[in-house]
Amino acid sequence: MKSVISYTLSHCQKCLKCLKVCPTEAITIVQERVHIDSRRCINCGHCIEVCNTQGLQGKGSTLVDLDNYDYTVALLPSALFSCTKNAKEAAQLVEAIRRLGFDEVVEMSAIEGAIQHRVKQRIKDAVMHPLISSFCPVVNRLIRLRYPMLLDRLLDLDYPNEIAADLIRTQRTGKGKVGIFCFCECVSKLQLARYPYGNRHSQIDHAVSIGDHFPLIRALKDNEASSIELCRSGLESASLHHDALKGLKVLEADGQDKVQQVLELAEFGQLDQFDYLSLSFCINGCIGGRLLWGNPFEAELHLKKLLETAKKPAVDEDLIPFGSHQEESVSDLLTIQEKLKLFEKVNEVMEKLPHFDCGACGFASCRNMAENIATGKRKLTDCRVLRNDEVKK
């Protein structure tokens, strides 16, 4: 997975906030410039959130690319509708997005509803428990990076927007060159498209940041509404706090701290009494995506209101194929012996470092610095605290 975070040197104030907030220590500052290690970055967007100067940004495709296709489709996740107060406003939102220049707007609630039925089926058929949800790209990447022993527990279902895009292509073969633009509710899902981040395995042509186009959508929104119906089970899947998987032993966890705690416990087999671990790095699930306007708590209230009138049936379950999404490997290709030698060397370096984790060297922690010293990328003299001590002596 490529990092979707871009860095603007002229806006950066070298405040070190991004350095400290990154959960995987993917960010370093070398020669007064931020560097993002794409092998460590999980695209959680925490660094963007704390950057007050827009030195770090996560941008998707622009709508200029609409002209490159014979037929264009806007793909809308169910989480987007949590920004609307009722069914009428949801229909007005769909019409406003269509006016951006799309030939068709497809909302995904009926597809996501069918996926939830597939999830139930898979959980009931599973030999090992718990299974782990596979719909949050940040959680999937974190498992690959930090908890590889849990990889065989990940649910073998692709991302809902990929499944939806594949169905759209199959059903619109006579439309010429079809362009699918997926409106993304969080930074991590910007990577799940061919543009702008080059995911060649994706069925989606362009990933669009909802937040970037909100002012224009709001300007186009009026009393005219599209004719749409929403699917209850699909809407429920956008939040962690609804009975989408009623009757099963489900552990729900949202936010970085809870997710990491759950994964640590699961890795040591302490959560085997559960059937399913439903995990989301965003608060309250996908409705807490940072690219959505509003907040995840108000979104919960909106979702409850929408569920009252959501009567559209889910699509046929047989249209939802089993199969995992393709992600690049994050293995370091070192043998066990090489890893043990590196670990020993890192510990030797750590004995010489001050353990302040001050970030002055450009690394988030002394251990991260020690790893770079052990691999020859940095020197012990790069530690500013040690240099200051030498000056005092």
Image: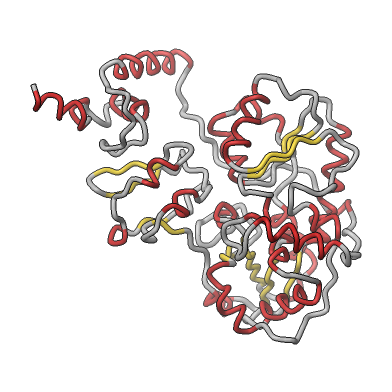
Q: Is residue 237 left or right of residue 140?
A: right
**Corner quadrant of residue 96:** bottom right
- Give the residue displayed 83% in from the left and 61% down from the top: 110
Which image quadrant is residue 187 in? bottom right
Image quarter where the C terminus lies is top left
Q: Position of residue 156 (x, y in %)?
A: 74, 39
User: Which of the 4 quarters of the picture holds residue 258?
Assistant: top right
How was this image coloured?
A: secondary structure
Seen at 61% across and 79% down, the residue is 218
Q: Residue at x 74, y 61 (%)?
A: 78
Which of the two residues, 340 or 278, is positioned nearer the viewer here? 278
Q: Is residue 312 above or below residue 32?
A: below
Q: Is residue 366 above or below residue 9?
A: above
In the rendered image, residue 120, in percent from the top left (x then y), is placed at 86, 41
In the rendering, at what x and y percent does residue 380 appear?
A: 22, 25
How far across and down, in percent of the image, does residue 263 sit? 63, 30
Front residue (pair 51, 135)? 51
Compared with 306, 373 (above or below) is above
Q: Is residue 118 left or right of residue 137?
A: right
The residue depicted at 37 percent of the width and 13 percent of the height is 344
